[in-house]
Image (cartoon, rainbow, N blue to C red):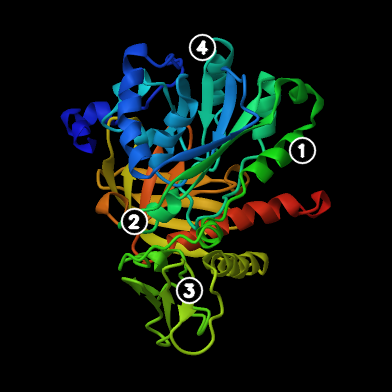
């Protein structure tokens, strides 16, 4: 449905989108059966099983926090809360072409990884006025590695503000069936754990740290371990295709951004080392030592490399990029090429655009605890999303296979900034 935005004039698409006049509405009753009809086939196909714990007697309003691995998360969430309605937070690019429909079924627009106080007021309205379930995907993006992403510290404050129960929906099988890094679908059974982790009485007694600790514990997942523990066989021939975008550093020769993948193989053209992804989701070197058989171990090893590069002051990224702007939900606008820089000082996007205007857009490291990246976004290539409250720039580097490193660097720069003693600032 992305083609629908083409019917909007460029003038309309260039207008900034105001959220202030749009309060979340209750999901239209007439559309509730539609959401069920869209969700039930997915549940049947994947033989969905939902394990509910501490949910007896719980009715809206409450806060539902869900893990995020793919579009099927929304369908499973719909099945999990039946027969109740919800309002749920959706990134603004999810509204492109379907803005009216998403608003009618309870969608709340949000720009990823921005400090949006208006969203807090909207969620308060959902819970206290609409008396609905407020569904939030706090990881704010599909899981890159099949493991838990960083969660925002503000979750505890949101819970305290609303004084309502908290439920966590931890979905399993979604990443294995539709990996963020792959264009190939696999069949995997879906099993989700739905648990009330904080009840109404506990909210006022728990500290912010205790609330966040409970959420983090309930959010733990490792899809590759889950696959092995549950003896799930995935024997599709393209099961490793695309994995090189996540595991972009070779543990054998340390070359960076040179890794490739094809079918069930991951390999480094620089040194010739090859790994097979087995039907059990493990990696096995075809010759010599297997440094990392567990995919998340390789992923976290790369993170440590980037963390050390940041700590030593050697991290710096610069490249020519193509830019698409998304000021509102009416469509992407190509605005030209510019230069993107990223360092411990944050992001800077600058240059002269196609229409002759200058762009000089910056994001401070203290404002970005993480960043959203995409692989082969809309078939245009890998990109990084840079957002403030007024616009989102989809930035496509010329260099290949670099966006995962940028994502690591953002998180490590923020982490090291937070850990820095006050007297050293």
Query: Which of label 3 and label 4 is nearer to you?
Result: 3
**Helix, strand, or loop for circle 3?**
strand
Q: Nearer the viewer, residue 324 or 293?
A: 293
- Number of other residues with Cα within 10 Å of mark 3, as a class: few under 14, some 14 to 19, many 20 or more: many
The residue wearing badge 4 is 130
Residue underneath mark 2: 186
The residue that mark 3 highlights is 283
Is residue 39 depicted above or below 118 in this figure? below
At horizontal 26% and vertical 31% (from top left) the residue drawn is 97
The answer to whether residue 305 is above or below residue 70 is below
Q: Quadrant of the N terminus?
A: top left
> Which one is earlier in the sequence, the residue at label 4 or at label 2?
4
Residue 141 in picture, x, y percent from top left: 47, 45
Q: CA distance from mark 3 to mark 1?
A: 37 Å
Tag in front: 4 or 2? 2
Residue hosting label 1:
209
- What whole-number distance in Å separates the C-alpha atoms at marks 3 and 4? 48 Å
Label 2 crowd bin: few (<14), some (14–19), many (20+), radius 10 Å: some
Q: Are marks 1 and 2 in contact (CB under 8 Å)?
A: no
Label 3 or label 2, whichever comes before in sequence order: 2
Q: Give the crowd class for mark 4: few <14, some 14-19, many >=20 residues within 10 Å.
A: some
Name the spot of residue 110 as percent of width and height, x first.
46, 31
Q: Is residue 403 above or below residue 60?
A: below
**What residue is rendered at 36% in x and 67% in y?**
400
- Measure the alpha-carbon separation of dots 1 and 2: 39 Å
Q: Residue at x 49, y 26 (%)?
A: 81
Q: Secondary structure at mark 2?
A: loop
């Amino acid at each position: 449905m992305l083609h629908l935005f083409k019917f909007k004039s460029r003038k309309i698409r260039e207008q900034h989108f105001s959220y202030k006049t749009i309060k979340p509405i209750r999901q239209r009753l007439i559309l509730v059966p539609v959401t069920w009809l869209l969700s039930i086939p997915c549940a049947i196909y994947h033989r969905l099983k939902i394990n509910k714990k501490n949910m007896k007697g719980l009715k809206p309003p409450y806060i539902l926090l869900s893990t995020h691995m793919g579009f099927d998360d929304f369908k499973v969430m719909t099945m999990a809360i039946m027969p109740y309605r919800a309002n749920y937070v959706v990134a603004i690019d999810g509204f492109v072409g379907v803005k009216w429909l998403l608003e009618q079924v309870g969608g709340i627009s949000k720009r990823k990884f921005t400090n949006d106080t208006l969203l807090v007021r909207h969620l308060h309205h959902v819970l206290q006025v609409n008396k609905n379930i407020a569904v939030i995907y706090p990881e704010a993006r599909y899981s890159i590695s099949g493991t838990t992403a960083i969660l925002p510290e503000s979750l505890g404050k949101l819970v305290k503000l609303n004084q309502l129960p908290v439920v966590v929906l931890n979905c399993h099988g979604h990443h294995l069936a539709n990996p963020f890094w792959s264009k190939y679908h696999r069949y995997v059974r879906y099993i989700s754990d739905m648990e009330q982790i904080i009840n109404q009485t506990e909210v006022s007694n728990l500290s912010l740290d205790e609330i966040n600790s409970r959420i983090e514990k309930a959010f733990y997942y490792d899809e590759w371990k889950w696959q092995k523990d549950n003896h799930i066989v995935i024997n599709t021939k393209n099961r490793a295709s695309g994995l090189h975008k996540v595991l972009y550093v070779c543990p054998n020769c340390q070359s960076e951004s040179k890794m490739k993948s094809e079918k069930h193989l991951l390999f480094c053209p620089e040194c010739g080392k090859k790994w097979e992804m087995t039907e059990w989701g493990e990696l096995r070197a075809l010759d010599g030592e297997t440094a990392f058989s567990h995919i998340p171990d390789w992923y976290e090893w790369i993170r440590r490399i980037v963390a050390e590069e940041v700590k030593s002051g050697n991290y710096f990224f610069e490249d020519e990029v193509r830019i698409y702007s998304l000021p509102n939900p009416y469509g992407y606008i190509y605005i030209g090429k510019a230069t993107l820089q990223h360092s411990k000082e944050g992001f800077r996007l600058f240059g002269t655009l196609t229409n002759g205007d200058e762009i000089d857009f910056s994001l401070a490291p203290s404002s970005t605890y993480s960043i959203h990246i995409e692989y082969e976004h809309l078939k245009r290539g890998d990109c990084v999303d840079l957002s403030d409250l007024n616009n989102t720039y989809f930035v496509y580097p010329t260099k290949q296979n670099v966006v995962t490193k940028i994502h690591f660097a953002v998180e490590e720069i923020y982490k090291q900034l937070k850990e820095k003693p006050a007297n050293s600032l």
